Amino acid sequence: MNARLDLIGMVVEEMARSLDFYRQLGLELPPEADQQPHVEATLPGGLRLAWDTVQTIHSFDPDWRPPPSGGPRIALAFRLGSPAEVNKAYDKLVSLGHHGHKTPWDAFWGQRYAIVHDPDGNAIDLFCANA
């Protein structure tokens, strides 16, 4: 069997609030998607990212509950073009009221790195290779 990762799905409390966050990272999501219970976006390279409301998940899995720890459910890493772009993306998202978990730093593994939480508490890693 050769499984290929095709879609990353996230469960969200408020679709519009979540999609607005990802629009700030450059994903093209139409405004009408804000009112949908399920939204998908195909990323460069073909991987799909999907959002489902809690109500949608409960429609086929009524016993679903978020992880009990209260921590991030998943982590998505977004590559940016330069250390300045990492700093700018982090500052922009935090200025819009999103939780900045780790301010940008030069990681020992050779990348500029930062972590922000999306509206549902998922870790969003912002990174690039250090010049």
Image: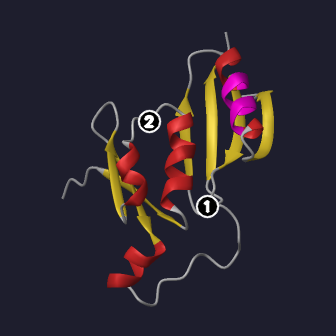
Residue occupied by mark 2: 27
Residue name at image x 36 percent, y 61 percent: 36
Nearer to me, 124 or 5: 124
Residue 120 numbered mark, or none: 1
Q: Are marks 1 and 2 in contact (CB under 8 Å)?
A: no
Vertical relation: 118 (above or below) 25: below
Residue 111 covered by magenta stretch: no
Position of 1 compared to 59: left or right? left
Position of 113 compared to 4: left or right? right
Residue 60 numbered mark, or none: none
Residue name at image x 81 percent, y 35 percent: 103
Label 1: how many Cα within 10 Å (few below 14, some 14–19, many 20+): some
The percent coordinates of residue 56 (x first, y second) are 38, 75
**Res 96 → quadrant:** top right
State whether the magenta stretch is mostly helix, strand or loop: helix
Region in magenta: 87-93
Residue name at image x 50 percent, y 55 percent: 16
Q: Tag 2, which secondary structure?
A: loop
Vertical relation: 125 (above or below) 17: above
Q: What amino acid type should be assigned to the residue bearing mark 1?
A: Asp
